[in-house]
Amino acid sequence: MDSNKLTAWDVVEIARNPKRKTSLDYILEIFDEFIELHGDRISTDDKSIVCGIATIDDRSFTVIAEQKGRNTKENIERNFGMPNPSSYRKAIRFMKEAEKFNRPVITFIDTKGAYPGIEAEKKGQGEAIAKSMFEMAKLKVPIISIVIGEGSSGGALAIGVANKVYMLENAVYSILSPEGYSSILWKDASRYKEAAEKMKLTAKDLFELGIIDDIINEPAEMDEETFTKVSDNIKEHIKKDISDMCSLDKKDVVEHRYQKYRKIKGFMEV
Amino acid sequence: MIVDKIKKRESRNDITKKSKIDIPVGKWIKCDKCGEIVYKEIVRSNMNICPNCGHYFRMHIGRRLEQIIDEGTYKRFELKIETTNPLGLEDYPKKLKSLREKTGLEEAVACGTGKINGEEVVIAIMDSGFMMGSMGAVVGEKITYSIEKAIELKLPLIIFSVSGGARMQEGIISLMQMAKTTAALTKLDEAGLLYISVLTDPTYGGVTASFASLGDIILAEPGAMIGFAGPRVIEQTIGESLPEGFQTAEFLLEHGFIDKIVERKDLKDTLSQLVKLHKKRNFGDGGKNFFN
């Protein structure tokens, strides 16, 4: 497939492909070392978000990643990559640890959305997402986020408030799924393809809107060789950004992040 | 999803459209809880509460201001902004225009400074009558501006939320308002200022998942429906019906997300009391004279 000719819906399908590389695939490829750590220190260890410490050269990072299953069994264990409130609270715990030990944070975004369920609401899904963004917004270490597959709704943004945000070329990032979008806006779930075109959910759209900082190129169908290339590309972005941000003091890192969101317009003086 | 349900409730509310009884347009209102037809003036003088069953009607921004802010003290922020219609939807600007004419509101939120029993605050109030209080770029900017004003003026901030969530018509731009408002609240937090979030019926989606849940103190009106995902989405996802009282203010209180449920008649006094309590001298800034 020529990736220039893909429709927005084609890209959605690529982003959702169950064979697509997941966060852990990228983490293991990009970092020299990775140790996964567990637990939210409140009540549980949720597996839809993976957290840990990783290294590139002699630098350490905190990694927080939404993780889809690579088979049915793993998908059940990981709630199909749809985080619960406890997942975000676990992420927050690792963000704070990152700050304490001055580790930059790298997040990988890949979710259909925060899980909609009774228990999730009981435990405060909305509050958990809000608090995660809140902690990220004021975290005194650099944060880099990479949307590798599906970036759906607040469930994605919850771990995506970063100094630099990147998207793989065939990842999508949107307010919700095209199906949900057409159902809400046009009361007709069957117009999802049209919705996908309208929603500005591709990497190119988001780059043009100034919401992401760069597009990481990838082919429509990835093999092991291109996977290594794409991973190397992500790694180069991380290394460059961290080198650039090293000279900033803690206050400036937070302000840099603040301005990134403050300048997103969408309105005009009248 | 959520919006559908809310709209249904609204149309039930709208007695001027479909009424079995022939009653003068605009003077009467049907309570959507007990079904009683009640005289609008009586509801109005009763803080928009049904005199028959105590059900809380949703409130227009103007009415809420009258109820909460001391007369003649409200000064609105002069902020002349409009959406750029980022997705280029054809009907959206028309819809906004007709809503502005119909509701007399510029957008789904109004903000300014005012006094509550003499206590000066920055206040932002949302309105469900304007696109279900949904948050697009303008709402997000007005909320953010209010937060920044509170920091500049060193005033407590009070936000009354009522919203179906992020505004679909502005797509990803709406989603980003969650990050923008949240980021602004971190600055308010660091400035050590008080933020009281008041949740009213209904508060959902991107508003619940951002500024509405981030109050130092979170209050709610009795019976208000509050959640992230709408009830219908949850039912469809899990394939079972929802328990009685799910996502009500009382449910949230039980699960630890609300500090207090406050009846409408007590809201003004509770707010001024909380603001006053936070003006007391704190440990650390009084030195040796802490108890003097």
Image (spheres, grey):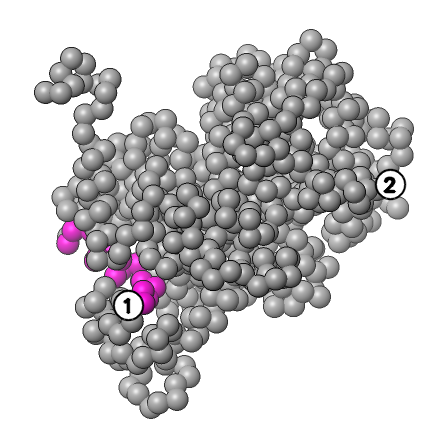
Residue at 32% x, 67% y: name it: B55
Whether residue B80 can be seen here: no
**Of the pair B216 and B76, the residue shown nearer to us:** B216
Please tell me in which quadrant of the rendered image residue A52 appears: top right
Magenta residues span B54-71
Residue B272: percent from left, percent from top: 19, 44
Q: Which mark is residue B54?
A: 1
| In this rendering, the label closer to the viewer, 1 or 2 | 1
Q: Identify the amino acid type marked 2.
A: Glu
**On the picture, is B26 further left or further right than B11?**
left
Q: Residue at x 56, y 30 (%)?
A: A40
Query: SS of the residue at dot 2?
Result: loop
**Residue at x 63% of width, y 27% of height:** A38
What is the count of numbered marks? 2
Which residue is drawn at the image coordinates 39% and 85% (left, top)? B19
**Chain letter behind tag 2:** A
Mark 1 in CB contact with mark 2 (< 8 angstroms)? no
Q: What numbered label is drawn on residue B161?
A: none
Check disc 2 and report the residue beneath it.
Answer: A221
B200 part of magenta stretch: no
Instruction: Give the x, y percent position of residue A249.
Output: 49, 14
Residue A60 position, x and y percent, is: 65, 14
- Percent x, y for residue A120? 55, 47
**Magenta stretch contains residue B57:** yes
Q: CA distance from mark 1 to mark 2?
A: 61 Å
What is the chain letter for disc 1?
A: B
Q: Amino acid at mark 1?
A: Gly
What quarter of the picture does the C terminus of chain B occupy?
top left
Q: Quadrant of residue B32?
A: bottom left
Viewer-closest of A49 and A159: A49
